[in-house]
Amino acid sequence: MADTLTIRTAGIVTVQDLGRVGRSRYGLPANGASDQHSARVANVLCGNDERAPLLEITALDFACVPSGDILIAVTGAPADVTVQGTVHPQWEPVPVRAGETVRVTGIRRGLRVYLAVLGSFEADHLQGSCAPDTVLGFGPALREGDELALRTACPPIDHPFSRIPLFRLNAPVPPFPTTWTIDVTDGPDRAEFGDTGRRLFDAPFTVSPRSNHIGLRLQGEVPRRIAKGEVLSRGVPIGAVEVPAGDELLVLHRGRGVTAGYPVLAVVTATGLSALGQVRPGQTIRFRHRTLDQAVTAHRAQRGAIDALRTRVRTAFDSLRIRAPIGS
């Protein structure tokens, strides 16, 4: 029988990957990990393909127990990570023996934590992704007692002379500030807001408790559309900053429907989307304008840092004779 990972404390946890790429043409939301950077890094730290299934833990405490020896990595928002009561660092690989309890508690400053396992685990897929879709009812949240079948065993790993950590891989850890700065480029309807469009950058916005993975509702000094006439429903990108009638902005995230009919003032950049996936209700954000060239440069730098990390992980794993999954 395959080894398993048993959920002991569920909180709010789902099996995620990077979502359904290229399925918008069929009307399917992308979904997937809200903080794609942290999810990618967690898998890379475990020697996995960055698109492999992993756990997304939201806000509440979590605990699990493996039936065999495993290697894990925990990224995302700052939290307290322990293995059988011993504190371990985030953003580094951590060996776990069979039967030891892994706990993630005290999630703070951000909203989501990601836990990857060497070799990943078995998961159901829909249209090429295991990401949950709340509209279709696919991929429900995990519950206490659920078991995930592990794909790969990991031999016990320990320092031969002391209990100091084995890994210092210098993963690219993003900031988790009190006030978030979210980068955006101009949206297709920027000209329809005239001078009021500057309000997006002049003052902070507060995240409403009604926010979720579909979109974030923001309260503040909302820009006003000065153009007349209706906006026809059309395709909208992930990260669209919409301005509906009322006193809130709506920022579409990974669970967004593929069409909408509100004017789009701006679009959150790829790096900004990962940051936005960590913003908690009640926190404040400021938008920062970026050109397309600046947005692309930032995205390439972030991906370059992950590629460099992947090389360091392979070197470390080779030296320790850890067999990484094929295709990682």
Image (cartoon, rainbow, N blue to C red):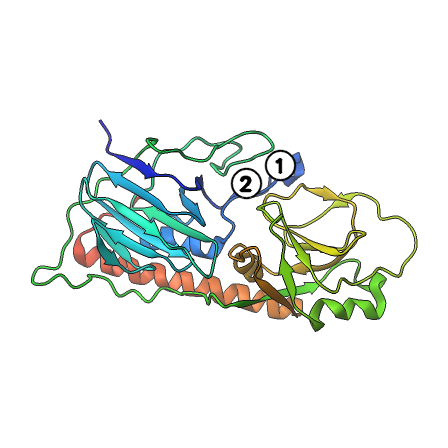
Q: Residues within 10 Å of mark 1 (few under 14, many from 20)?
A: some
User: Which is more toward the observer, 111 or 136?
Assistant: 111
Q: Secondary structure at mark 1?
A: loop
Can residue 287 be seen from the camera position used here? yes
Q: Residue 166 at x, y = what percent?
A: 19, 61
Q: Three-letter amino acid code at disc 1?
A: Leu
Position above or below: 185 against 54: below
Q: Residue 208: which quarter of the image?
A: bottom right
Mark number, residue 28: 1
Q: Is residue 328 visible?
A: no
Location of the N terminus by quadrant is top left
3D distance between C-alphas at marks 1 and 2: 8 Å
Q: Nearer the viewer, residue 124 or 245?
A: 245
Q: Determine the residue located farthest toward the bottom in the rendered image.
A: 202
Q: Is residue 260 left or right of residue 273?
A: right
Instruction: Please state the horizontal and vertical placement of residue 99, each as a whole percent of the image.
Output: 19, 39
Q: Residue furthest top?
A: 1
User: At x 81% / y 68%, what residue is drawn?
Assistant: 196
Side (left or right) of 155 relative to 229? left
Q: Which residue is mark 2?
A: 20
Q: Cβ–Cβ below 8 Å for labels 1 and 2?
A: yes
Q: Position of residue 271 (x, y in %)?
A: 54, 61
